[in-house]
Structures are given as structure tokens and as C-alpha cells.
Image: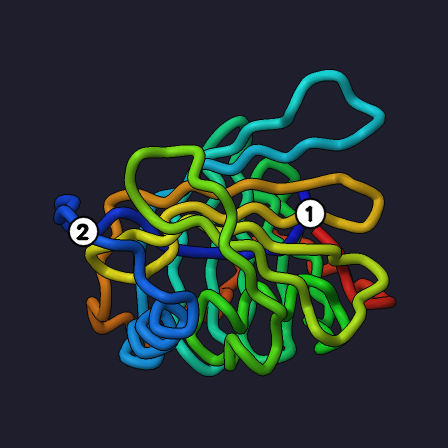
Amino acid sequence: MIQGLLLIFLALFPFQAVGEPLPLDVLISKIQSAYENLKDLQASFEQETVIQDFKTPVKYTGDLFLKKRDKMKLVYRHPKKEELFINGNQLITYLPDQHQAIKGIFSKDQESKLPVRLLSGEAILGKEFNITRQEAKHSTGYELLLIPRQKDENLEKIEVKIDPSTYLIQKLRLVQTNQNSSSFSFSKAQVNPGLKDPLFTFTPPEGTEIIQAFPPLNK
């Protein structure tokens, strides 16, 4: 799976009818404001990863926990159990079936850093992305294309669908320069539930082998 995760959000409230489409600058401002007010978030997700050399997409389901200032936890439940912890620049991947934890560095240079900043509300949208509106594939929501202003050797673009009632991300698609992609859909979201810091700290169960990984990991 592609680590880039990341990340978050869903249709939190019932759809409310909207009139004329918002001007792009107004829409961006509303999205920025919604994420600036975000302190933490909990949601279920479905992930679909498309790898060019594979005919069938790989699908995952799990739960996401996110807190501002570089704290994230992904709990994969299907097709296999796996947990990923990001706490500052520390990245730990826990593989319970193998009784192993792989410890690495979540580098600011990794392509996954920008999506995490986006979903946690730490990114300044207009400064970090060139943003254009896409033709809506669905009857509700706003669909946007985000191109990183700073060229990234791995991440080409991010496509998002915005909930018109919350201005949070319902769906997110990360496209790499090699055209591999990961799509995330979010549901059952709880905004600002008051997640505690220990949730994002990995405590290895007895008998777990700790493996130090270098260079920084890519999931």
C-alpha cells in the first residue's frame, strides 16, 4: 500500500442543498477555515491502491485517528491487520501477525508529508497548491485538483471531493508520478472528539521484535 496517506474525512452531516457554485477563492477559504478549526479526528476509511503492473486494485479497510502537530494512527483491519503510527518524525509499522514492529523516520521529504499536512489542517492551501475546480462526477460536493507548487519527484497531484455542508474532505486520491495511486473514502467521522496523546504512542506487546529501518520508510 502507498503510505500517503494518510488520511481523512467524510460526509459528516446530511447534505444541504446549495445554490450557485461558490467562487473558487471563496470555496478555498471555507475549506481552509474548516481545517484550521480541526483539532483531531477519528474516522473509518476504505482505501484502494492501483499499481500499474497489477491488473487488480488492492483494497483495504480500517480506522484513522489524527491529531494536529504530526500525530496519526492508521489501523488496517482488512485484508490483514496492521497498524501505522506517526508521532512527529517517528514512524512505526506494527505487524501483529509477524510479531514485528518496523521503526523508521517520517521524513519531511516524503511525498506522504504533504497529504498529512493537508488533512490535518496545517497546509496553507493557496500557498502550497495550484488549485482548479474539476467537473463534478457526482451530484453533490465540490471536486478539486491540487497540484503541489513545489515539484515533488513522487507525488504528481491530489484529487479531492469536498462535502458542501462541512467543507471537509469526503474522498481523496493521491496520484504518483509513476501513475500509481491510492484513493481514500471516509465515513463515520467524529470531529474534535478529544483524542489523547497516548493513542499515538506505540507500546510493543511482549515478544515483539523491533526492527530499525533505514532509510525512511515508504508504505
Q: Is residue 154 above or below residue 148?
A: above
In the image, residue 10 lies at what x, y percent?
A: 31, 49
Tell me residue 180's x, y (percent). 75, 39
Residue 198 appears in the figure: no
Question: Image check: 207 left or right of 64?
Answer: right
Number of other residues with Cα within 10 Å of mark 1, as a class: few under 14, some 14 to 19, many 20 or more: some
Disc number at residue 59?
none
Residue at position x 80%, y 57% from top? Answer: 154
Of circles 2 and 1, which is in front? 2
The reply to whether discs 2 and 1 touch (Cβ–Cβ < 8 Å) is: no
Determine the residue located farthest toward the front in the rendered image. Answer: 20
Q: Identify which amino acid the numbered label 2 is placed on.
A: Val
Q: Which residue is drawn at 70% across and 74% down?
A: 149
Identity of the residue drawn at 31% across and 78% down? 33
Kind of residue at badge 1: Val
Q: Pinpoint residue 194: horizontal percent, then vertical percent.
A: 22, 73
Within 10 Å of the Cα at label 2, are there few (<14), some (14-19), or many (20+) other Cα atoms?
few
Work out whether residue 99 or residue 17 is closer to the camera in this orientation and state it.
Answer: 17
Nearest the viewer among 95 and 188 is: 188
Expressed as whole percent of the image width and height from the top left, the position of residue 147 reads: 66, 62
Query: In this view of the protein, can residue 21 be seen by the observer?
Result: yes
Say which residue label 1 marks: 175
Question: Which comes before the other along the chain, label 2 or label 1?
Answer: 2
Q: Which residue is drawn at 61% across and 71% down?
A: 129
Which numbered dot is residue 18? 2
Quadrant in the picture for the N terminus? top right
As helix, strand or loop, the secondary structure at mark 2 comes to loop
Q: How many labels does the image show?
A: 2
